[in-house]
Amino acid sequence: MTDTTLAASPARLSRADWLASLPRNTACSALVLHDAEYRLLLVHATYEDSWQFVGGVRDAQDDPWTTAVREAREEIGYELVGPPRLLGYDWVTFDDCEPAVQHFFRAPVLEPGRLDDIRLSEEHDDWLLLSVEEWTRHLGPHRARRLRPVRDALRTGRPLCLRDGYPVT
């Protein structure tokens, strides 16, 4: 009997055994901050020398939206107001741990004056607002591969559905 069969047959197991048989993954959320030209704001993480969307891993009792709001406040001092606007997700797999689902939420268009209000946390030492093309030159194609689909989802309003940064077709 495979794990898939166990998860699909809860009547054969105790609740505890059935729950233990379910696959595990990490949930993360990101707030996609952009200007009217669809330039994307990324922050530089000091703990791993990488550029990333504003966001992070879900706390135990948080839903994805609460995570995005909290992380934006903690990482750049951005107070998000209004209803959630889900942009989509990226299902990310790793060689050394369980997969993660990264939820993307659309922020309101950044007005130039809001950029002056950015206050970086200790986890970050810089931020940049660049076009996808500029980010690709800055990060390289592998690290930047999810940026074009994210930008396109912002422009078109079509849901973002990625697997390891590539659009699911």
Image (spheres, rainbow, N blue to C red):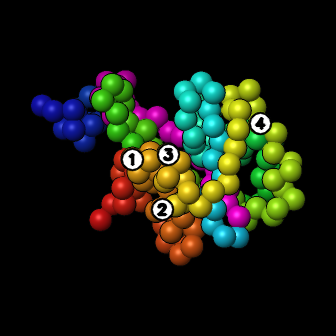
Q: What whole-number distance in Å separates the C-alpha atoms at marks 3 and 4?
A: 21 Å
Residue occupying image coordinates x 44% and y 47%: 140
Looking at the rendered image, the disc whose residue lies closer to the viewer, 2 or 3, is 3
Image-quadrant location for residue 29:
top right
Q: What whole-number distance in Å separates the C-alpha atoms at marks 1 and 4?
A: 26 Å
Please tell me how crowded label 4 is: few (under 14), some (14-19), or many (20+) other residues with Cα within 10 Å. some
Looking at the rendered image, the disc whose residue lies closer to the viewer, 1 or 4, is 1
**Residue 11, how many percent across, how many down?**
26, 36
N-terminal label among 3 and 4 = 4
Which amino acid is tagged 4? Leu
In the orientation shown, which residue stands out farthest toward the front?
137
**Which residue is disc 4 drawn over?**
120
For the residues labelled 1 and 4, say whether their Cβ atoms are less than 8 Å apart. Answer: no
Which amino acid is tagged 2? Arg
**Which residue is disc 3 drawn over?**
139
Q: Is residue 158 left or right of residue 141?
A: right
**Which residue is disc 2 drawn over?**
148
Please tell me how crowded label 2 is: few (under 14), some (14-19), or many (20+) other residues with Cα within 10 Å. some
Q: Which residues are magenta?
A: 15-35
Q: What whole-number distance in Å separates the C-alpha atoms at marks 4 and 2?
A: 25 Å
In the orientation shown, which residue stands out farthest toward the left?
1
Depicted 148 relative to depicted 93: above or below? below
**Residue 32, how many percent across, how many down?**
63, 55
Depicted 154 relative to depicted 40: above or below? below
Residue occupying image coordinates x 56% and y 30%: 49
